Image (cartoon, rainbow, N blue to C red):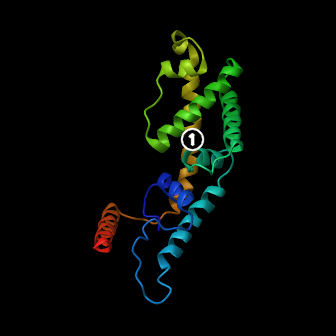
Amino acid sequence: MINTTSARAAITMAMANGWRSPDLAVRVQTGSKGDTTPQILHGIDCGRVLAAVDALPEPVRSWIYVAYAPAGWVTENHVWRVQEELITEYHRRRQVREPGKIAVMALVCLSDMRARLSRNAPKLGPAAIAKKVRFDIRNWGNGWSDSYAVLEDIIDQWDLEGLGPIAKNLPRWTREALEEEREERKQRRAVAQL
């Protein structure tokens, strides 16, 4: 089962594990076939999470796939769709600077935000952004920092819109219940190794 209160973690678990339960190292033999209840419950949880992701509007759905899906789930079409929508939303919010550089900056921002949200990587600094987008770092304060901030805000809004409905589908676990579940799992693994 998906034992988390984090929508981000639930998305990754559901997409990576599918119907397979990650905590089924030990099975209770109740008959010749074994107990499959945990697998069924895990599959139901995964289905709820994936249905919530698929119900999201574009470009939020594609952003959630790009940000949190494991390797193999994201296609080039997802990335291009998110980049196009990000650029369109940017143009809607602000006057257009150099359109070609904004397109590159959008890809850099997507990559940076994905790394920060899914892997807790540090934020790219102005020098790294300037190098990737190929503009002079001395111009960072002349609008480039504002442009990058607008792109980040757009992605943050998509993230917020996408994670909210998914979090509603997660079981309500308290921190204590999660800790108890983890401790029980450790004990079951220790018993199984004996």
In the orientation shown, which residue stands out farthest toward the front? 194
Q: Is residue 153 visible?
A: no
Q: Residue 184, image x and y in percent?
A: 31, 70
Secondary structure, mark 1, is: helix
The residue positioned 46% from the left and 42% from the top of the image is: 119
Write down the quadrant of residue 99 in the picture: top right
Which of the two residues, 161 or 135, is positioned nearer the viewer here?
A: 135
- Please, is residue 88 above or below residue 75 in the view? above
Which of the two residues, 89 or 80, is positioned nearer the viewer here?
A: 80
* Label 1: how many Cα within 10 Å (few below 14, some 14–19, many 20+): few
Which quadrant of the figure contains the C terminus? bottom left
The residue positioned 58% from the left and 29% from the top of the image is: 108
Q: Residue 113, image x and y in percent?
A: 53, 36
- Please, is residue 18 above or below residue 140 in the view? below
Q: Residue 162, image x and y in percent?
A: 58, 50
- Please, is residue 173 above or below residue 30 in the view? above
Q: Which residue is mark 1?
A: 157
The residue positioned 47% from the left and 75% from the top of the image is: 38
Residue type at tag 1: Gln
Number of labels in the image equals 1
The residue positioned 56% from the left and 34% from the top of the image is: 111
Which of the two residues, 29 or 38, is positioned nearer the viewer here?
A: 29
Q: Residue 164, image x and y in percent?
A: 53, 53
Relative to 173, is 76 on the left or the right?
right
Q: Is residue 155 visible?
A: yes
- Please, is residue 93 above or below residue 42 in the view? above
